[in-house]
Amino acid sequence: MDLTSPKTIKELLAKYETRPSKGLGQNFLIDKNVLNKIIESADLKPTDSVLEIGPGLGILTGGLAEKAGKVIAVEKDETMIEILKETLKDYKHIEVIGGDILKLDPMANSLNYKVIANIPYYLTSPLIRKFLESKNPPSEIILMVQKEVAQRICSNPPDMSLLSVSVQFYAKPEITFYVSKNCFWPAPKVDSAIIKIVPEKKYDISPDLFFEVVKAGFSQPRKQLVNNLTGLKLLDGVKLTKDFISDWLLKNNLKPSQRAETLNISDWINLAKSLNK
């Protein structure tokens, strides 16, 4: 069964009386070259376990299973789970789990595992943080996301965002290659990108305090830092005054007139650490 053929996909979906769900981001990959590049970018070994999120019809799942020792695929769409039973029936080391990945922890006891997923925009940030903040993070996260989202995640000053800071606090992200919207059926409205996220050593700072400061800084991105941070409530409920904020920023070699997008990860860490003191 050629799952890269739109004709085959349509026939399969018709057999199960279903259609691609826009809400779940069901745009099926039909380009074999892109498929192979995703598998190659994962650099899988027989000792690896893979968690695939949103396997859809299972085209990537089968390819991963040929390289990895075990593949666990989490699918939210109940009809797709039924289809996967057919398309993956020849693979003995693939386990399909039904449910919402944000509510599941299928790799809690796994060692040396990688996450691979083709996810809709709304799931990008919560999914990344779920795994980066996990007590048992994966060695790599490989995601197919919208091109613009991938660029935002990998951005540098002066184009930082809350999303890029959230990811780069925990990991090193890089775009490995871009994928044309024409490589999918049905074709989405925008191009995509494959992004590889490698978790790194966590910083010696409370994530709660760090993100309290960062979220306040980005609360209104076009405003100056001193205005966004004024009134920031600390974890104990104390509000910071504008004079305190100005002095605090200057002591960290930052201008009160700067905008949040111009700060790098080290700047935010220094701010949080000095506030903690």
Image: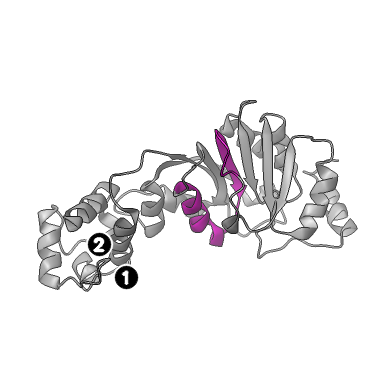
Residue 115 visible, this orientation:
yes
Name above or below for residue 8 compared with residue 33. below
- Secondary structure under badge 1? loop
Residue 24: x percent and y percent? 66, 61
- The answer to whether 149 appears left or right of 212 in the picture is right
Measured as percent of width and height from the top left, residue 64 is found at: 68, 35
- The residues bearing labels 1 and 2 have C-alpha atoms spaced at a distance of 9 Å
The x and y percentages for residue 59 are: 74, 42
Q: Amino acid at mark 1?
A: Gln
Q: Residues within 10 Å of mark 1 (few under 14, many from 20)?
A: some
- Residue at x 49% of width, y 54% of height: 149
Q: Quadrant of residue 163?
A: bottom left
Nearer-N-terminus badge (1/2): 1
Q: In the image, 72: left or right of 163? A: right
Relative placement, left or right, of 191 versus 15 is: left
Up the image or down, 219 lies above or below 120; here it is below
> Which residue shows up at 41% across the image and 43% down it?
171
Q: Which residue carries the number 1 mark?
A: 220
- Can I make out residue 6 in this image? no
Residue 128 in the magenta stretch? The answer is yes
Q: Residue furthest front?
A: 109
Q: What residue would you read off at disc 2?
A: 259
Q: Is residue 111 magenta?
A: yes
Q: Is residue 103 left or right of residue 15?
A: left
From the image, which quarter does the N terminus lie in? top right
Mark 2 lies on a secondary structure that is loop
Residue pictured at 73% horizontal, 59% vertical? 77
Q: Amino acid at mark 2?
A: Arg
Chain part drawn in magenta = 107-132
Contact, mark 1 vs mark 2 (Cβ under 8 Å): no
